[in-house]
Amino acid sequence: MHHAYLDKYANQNSFFHRLDSRVKFLAALIYTILILSIPPRSAAVVFCYVVAPFGMLVWAGIPIGFVARRILAVSPFVLVLALSCPFFDQTPYLLRLGDITFQLSGGWMRCFTILAKFAATMLTLFALTCTTRFTDMLAGLQQMQCPSILIVQLSFVYRYLFVLVDRVHHILRARAARKLRYLGLRQEIRIAAIMIAALFIQSLESAERIYRAMQGRGFTGSFHALKPIRINRRDIYFIFVFIGICIFLHSIMRIWLNELNGV
């Protein structure tokens, strides 16, 4: 594992890749808040919010399969929450699709809404991370006066996560080379606990060496982007288009809610 795995498509040269990291971060944050503020029985409205980040990914040249595989990797946790809703809310609701009318419980409507919000927010997150280098993101957060301790922690996670994962692979490979047979559940759990403890001790030792090395090099906790961070005409165009999209989607949500309430 290496940085190219984490930032696999962040170094391309599309319109969205060239946008200021602060503009993209604030747009993703506002868009996520708008998605989460949608009422819990408005799945159809949430799907309208999927279009913008999906189009951004396509325009930026990010493979949809790459994004879909990573969304599916974390989807089981959300599926458990979503599929539990029908058991707690049995309130019947009538839905109309043109001339077709059918009945669903409130729990199923909440389930579909949760899944739609999950898809929309994850697409928004990937639209941000796949078009922004992590170092540029940290430099932008620093200019936005975010707490320095948070920026330093995020930087360490980004820089040394691949080292930790490599060590896990080495431990598992060494274990597989020495394992001749299944030792039973109790013994396997004991060995796994020992491996985790060894990894934890090695991580502490590495952290101490890294801290001393950074002190020796005069690290001050500040991060700098490879290129100057400034708002240009391209970013202003994006801001106006983003505001227009938000107003349009909010209008659709208001119309949908008025029809749902019979106004």
Image (spheres, rainbow, N blue to C red):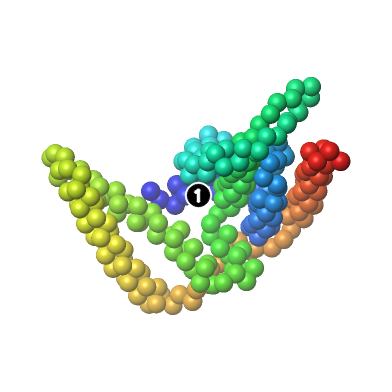
Quarter residue 207 falls in: bottom left
Seen from the viewer's position, the closer of residues 64 and 75 is 75
In the picture, residue 252 is in which quadrant?
top right
Q: Position of residue 151 (x, y in %)?
A: 52, 67
- Work out which residue is located at the far left of the displayed protein and give it: 180
Quarter residue 260 falls in: top right
Q: Position of residue 99 (x, y in %)?
A: 79, 22
Residue that extends furthest to the right in the rendered view of this protein: 263
The residue lying at 35 percent from left, 52 percent from top is 165
Q: Secondary structure at mark 1?
A: loop
Relative depth, front residue between 262 and 116: 262
**What amino acid does circle 1 point to?**
Asp
Q: Is residue 160 left or right of residue 17?
A: left
Q: Relative to residue 6, is residue 205 depicted above or below?
A: below
Q: Is residue 62 above or below residue 231?
A: above
Residue 227 image point, x, y percent: 60, 61
Task: Please say whether residue 144 is visible from this viewpoint.
Answer: yes
Q: Is residue 14 visible?
A: no
Above/below status of 198 relative to 243: below
134, 79: nearer the viewer: 79
Disc 1: which residue? 7
Which of the image's four quarters has the C terminus? top right
* Number of marks present in the image shown: 1
